[in-house]
Structures are given as structure tokens and as C-alpha cells.
Image (cartoon, rainbow, N blue to C red):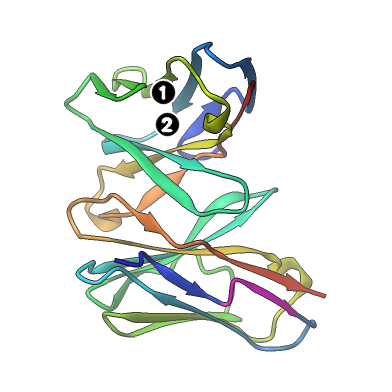
Amino acid sequence: SQQGEEDPQALSIQEGENATMNCSYKTSINNLQWYRQNSGRGLVHLILIRSNEREKHSGRLRVTLDTSKKSSSLLITASRAADTASYFCATDAKNLTSYGKLTFGQGTILTVHP
Amino acid sequence: DAGVIQSPRHEVTEMGQEVTLRCKPISGHNSLFWYRQTMMRGLELLIYFNNNVPIDDSGMPEDRFSAKMPNASFSTLKIQPSEPRDSAVYFCASSFQGANVLTFGAGSRLTVL
């Protein structure tokens, strides 16, 4: 299976609820990033968390990282219909031969109903 | 900054034809990446360049695919000859080395009939 696998594959919630997406990976990493993709568009960077960090916040986003379990979670609080998109985690493996190489997971499709 | 610019946005071609996708990265970014996205395989890294030099092309599916970066402001991904299984959205992304945060283009949707 791939480095960076998101769970669940799809998530459907009501506006105002919180959305939590998880990501698991296999190798040691330098950092883990989350991206968002609206339908028919390119990916947009949301947040980066380094391997020595455990939690990071940006607006309504909260990311956690557990390197012992090789997992991360993305929490979107007070979701809005405009948050409807696919969310991907991406890992920067701690490997000199893959410097700068990001490997993406399959993504979680989030639908927020108004 | 206009962001990462890709062309064409859409391309429909027939099997066996040559396809050339183009990318202009963000000025000042020195790393460039080509990804392919399909429903079945998700987002796959094809090749990436650092300072115009190909660093890792292990994701290029076969010899029909080639990529060049003749200068810091332009890259091409060529498929010759194209096949229906090459149908996908091809993304170009750039970053400033060390930051590892990628800025993606809008993608080129390729359909090979």
C-alpha cells in the first residue's frame, strides 16, 4: 500500500460540525503536509507539520502528528459548505535520495451539507 | 505572481499521436514536479527537477514519456506515442528547495481516444 493513506475515503457532514481525517504512512519523515483539492482544480497547500512537532493550528484547521504510530490527523472545526473538497496528506520521506519528493495519499472526499 | 501556469488545460487526441504538456513554474522556485492523477491510481509523481536537473524519474511509466526543463521558467512533458491508458489529469507543481511546500498548477486534462 502507498505511503500516506487517508481514512475515511469519504466523509459527509452537516455545516457547523467538525470533520476529522486521518493519514497513516510507512517510513520516517521530515514533514507531513495536508493539501486540499476542489473539483476540477489543482491542489492547494493547507498546512505543514514537521517531524519534531506534535500539533499545529491554522485558523479552523488543527493537525496532529504521532511519529511513533506514523499517523496524522486533520481536524476542520465548524465546517462550512465551502470546505467541500478532497483532502490529501503528503509525506516528505527522510531519505537523502528523495529530498523534496512528496508522496500523496489517495485522499478523503469531504462533503459538507448546508 | 500568476502561479504555476500549465497548458493546454484540456487536450483530446487520438491514440498514437504525440502530446506535449507545458509548465511555467513560479519565478524563484527551483524545484519542479510532474504528477499524474487518475481515479484508479490517485496522484503519482512522474518526475521532478531541481535547478533544471532531473533528480528522480522513477515514476515515469515507460519510454513513451519524456520530460525536459531547458531553463528555470519552462518545462515540458511529452508522450509519444500516446495511448488511451495515458488519459489522466497531469499536474505541474513547483517549490523553493527546502520549503517543500508545493504550488500546483490547474492541471492539463488529457483524453486519448
The spot of residue B112 in percent (x, y) is 76, 74
Amino acid type, mark 2: Tyr
Q: Secondary structure at mark 2?
A: loop
Residue at point 30%, 18% (across, down): A68
Quick one: label 2, few (<14), some, or many (20+) residues within 10 Å?
many
Q: Is residue B80 above or below residue A76?
A: below
Q: Is residue B111 left or right of residue B102?
A: right
Residue B2: quarter of image: bottom left
Residue at point 47%, 49% (across, down): A43
Residue beneath label 2, please?
Answer: A25
Residue A77: quarter of image: top left
The spot of residue A47 in percent (x, y) is 31, 35
Q: Is residue A74 above or below residue B33?
A: above
Q: Earlier in the sequence, mark 2 or mark 1?
A: 2
> Tag on residue A32?
none
Instruction: Specify the segment rendered in magenta.
Output: B8-12
Outermost residue, top side: A17
Amino acid type, mark 1: Leu
Residue beneath label 1, please?
Answer: A74
Q: Is residue A48 left or right of residue A44?
A: left
Q: Secondary structure at mark 1?
A: strand
